[in-house]
Amino acid sequence: MTQPPSSQPPQGGFGAPQDKPQGPPAQSPAQPPAPPQGPPPQPPQMPAAPPTPPGQPPQTPPAAPQPGYGSPQTPPAQPGYGYPQTAPGQPGYGYPQTAPGQPGYGYPTAPGQPGAQGNPYAQTQQGGYGYPGQPQYPGAPVPPQGGGGKNPFKGKPAAIVAAAVAGLLVIGGGVYLATSGGDGDKKPVADKSHSAAPSGSASVDQGDGKGDGRNAGTDDLNSGAKPGDAKVWLHENDTALPQGGADQYGPWVLGDTVVKAMYKEVVAYTVADGKQKWSVPLDTPLCGAPPSPTADGKIVVGVLESNTKDAKCNQMQMVDLTAGKLGWKAQVPAEGLFDSMVTLDMTISGNTLALARMGGASGFSMTDGKKLFGTPKTGNCRTEAFAGGSKLISAGSCIDPNNNDLDAPASEVLQELDATTGKAKWSFQYDKGWTINRVYSMDPLVVYAVNKDKKASNISTFTADGKVRSSVKTTSALTANCVGLGIIERALQGCWGVVADANTLYMATDGKDSGELGVGRSNEVVAFDLNTGNEKWHAAAPKGRMMQPLALENGKLTLYVEPGVEEAAAIASLPLTGGTPQTILQSPSSAGSTERNFYDPAAAWAGGRFFLLNTMVKGPKGDNKDNSILSFGK
C-alpha cells in the first residue's frame, strides 16, 4: 500500500468501523473489500502492510472566498452541501451510499421515516416508522420491519475488515452519554456526559405517578431475580403517534433524573425506580435534539413551526432539564434560498448551539437563542455538519471552481471552529472522494471517514492543532452502535460503544457465530495505541455474547454485555491491560427477552445504572406497545 499524500489521512485501511446494522445474526463478509490504492488486494489472511501516518501539517483551504454558495454546486447525487448521495428511493443522509445490495457504510434505508418528505407527522405518511429495510453488506439479512427482532444486537456487523487502516476517531453524541465515567474521571473520555447535579425531586415532581415503571410489567421483569441481581424498570409507549411513528431522543442523565423526548413531550423519570418526575408538553412535534445538554442541564430541541403537513423544522425551544420547565423559543433564520429545514442536526459546545441542515449551518446562543454566526466558510469550503462537546468540530465540502465536471468527487475538510464566531482555528483537507462520516471522540479527536468509490474506510486521531497523530491498523472487523440517523442532514455524532482516553481507543469487533446450536455470536474488544495506531490487546466476550465499551472509570474499562440466547444483559469490568471481563452488574434472567427487543437503541451509563432507549417508536395498537426506555442497576 502506498503512502498517503502528505496533507491527507492515510488512504487505505478498509477496516474502519461501520454503523451497526440491526437484525438477526449474520456472518461477516467472507473477504474484505479491496484497498483503495497501492498494490492489488491480498487475501484476508495476508493483509497489506499498514501505511505510514502522514507527518506534514494539514492544508488549509484557500482564504479567498468563492462565489456560488447561494445554490448547490453539485447535483443531488454528488457530495455537495449535504444533499442526498443516492438516487431517488435510496437513503439520502448526506453520506456516501452504494448501489442496492452493496455495502452502505452503515446507513440503512429507512422507508417511511419521519422527515423524508415534508412534515414527518402528517397523517398521510406511510411506512414502518423508520426501521432499516436494506441489508448493509453483501449477504446481510434484511432487518425486521415492524419492531425489534428476537435479538437486534446480534445482527449488527459492520464490514470493517481493516487490512491497514488509517482512520479518523469520531465521537458521537450517543458516545457522550454512553461512556460517562462519573465526576472522578480525570482523563479525557470519548463519551463523558454533561451531567448536572440532581434537581431535587420534591421541588420539580409534578407528575401524577402514572409513569411509575410498573405499567409495562416491571414486576415480571424482576420475577426471576437472584440475590445480587440488578433491579429493572421499563416503560412502554402509551403515547398516540402519527402513522409513521416518531423519533425518540435521549436518554439524558442528570443526577437522579433521566430524561427523554418524543413527539410533543419531554419526560423525566427517577433513575432508581422509573417513576415519572415531570412532563413538559410541546405545541408542535420534535424534529431534532442534541446528543447532550449543557453542564447545567439546559438543552435546546428543534420543533416544527406548526402542526400542518408542510411545516418546516425551523423552531428552537429551550428546555431546563433540571427544573422541568420550558425556556426561550426562537426561529432559525434561513441561510439562503436553498436552506431546506426538514430536520435539524444539533449539538452544543460551551454556550453555543450549532445547527446543521440541508443547505445551511448556524450557531446560536444557548442563553437567549440569538444568532452568533451563519454557515461557516473557508475559501472554497463550507460547513455541512457539526460535532460538539469540549470543542466545536465541523465537516464540510470544498468545490474546485476550475472543474466543470459535475461527476467529479468533491473534497471535504475537517475543522475546529471558534464556538462564538464560527471561524476556523485549523483545517485539514481530505483527498477527493473521502467523506467525513462520524466523530467517535472529541478529546482526543477521533474521526471516521469513508470512500465509497474505493470501498475504503479510515480511522485517525488528531492532535490539538489538527495534525494526524496516528491511524488505526488492524485486521479485525470493528463496529460501533450509531444512532440518530439523519434523513437529509449529516449526523456526525450519535455513536456509543466506543471509548477513548488520552492514549488508547477501545472498540468492539463485529463478532463471529459460534456454529453451535443455541449459542449466539461472540466478539472481542480491541485496544489501540493512539500514539502508533497499533493494537495493544484483544479481550474476548463470554461465549455466545457480544460486548461493547461504555466508560472508563476507577482505572478500568466498563462494558455492556448484550443479552445472549438465554442470558439477560449485564455490565462487566476489564483491566486497562486486557484480560477476562468480570461481571459487576447482572440483570435478572426474566428481563432478557425484553432487553433483546430494543431496536436501534441509544444507551447511557451513569451512576451505576444502564439505560436503553428505542430511537424509533410507534404508537400503541391495542395491547401491542413498543418498548420506550429500560434501565437496570443497583
Image: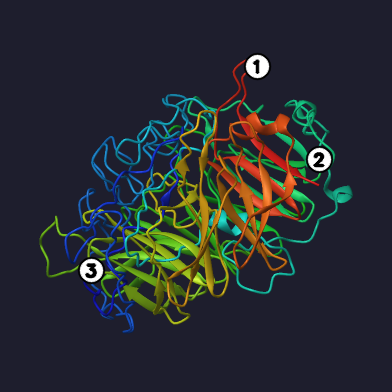
Q: Residues within 10 Å of mark 2 (few under 14, many from 20)?
A: some
**Residue 40: x %, y % from top left:** 16, 60
Query: Circle 3 sits in a helix, a strand or a loop, which is it?
Result: loop
Total numbered labels: 3
**Circle 3 is placed at which residue position?**
1
Marks 2 and 1 sit apart, C-alpha to C-alpha, by 23 Å
Left or right, residue 622 beside residue 362:
right
State the residue at coordinates (38%, 45%). Answer: 107
Of mark 3 and mark 2, the one earlier in the sequence is 3
| Identity, as a three-letter code, of the amino acid under mark 2 | Asp
| Identity, as a three-letter code, of the amino acid under mark 3 | Met
Query: Circle 2 sits in a helix, a strand or a loop, which is it?
Result: loop
Left or right, residue 83 beside residue 580:
left
Q: Is residue 41 visible?
A: yes
471 or 115, which is in the foreground? 471
Q: Taking 12 as reference, is 74 above or below it?
A: above
**Circle 2 is placed at which residue position?**
273
Marks 3 and 2 sit apart, C-alpha to C-alpha, by 55 Å
**Circle 1 is placed at which residue position?**
623
**Residue 179: x %, y % from top left:** 62, 58
Of mark 2 and mark 1, the one earlier in the sequence is 2
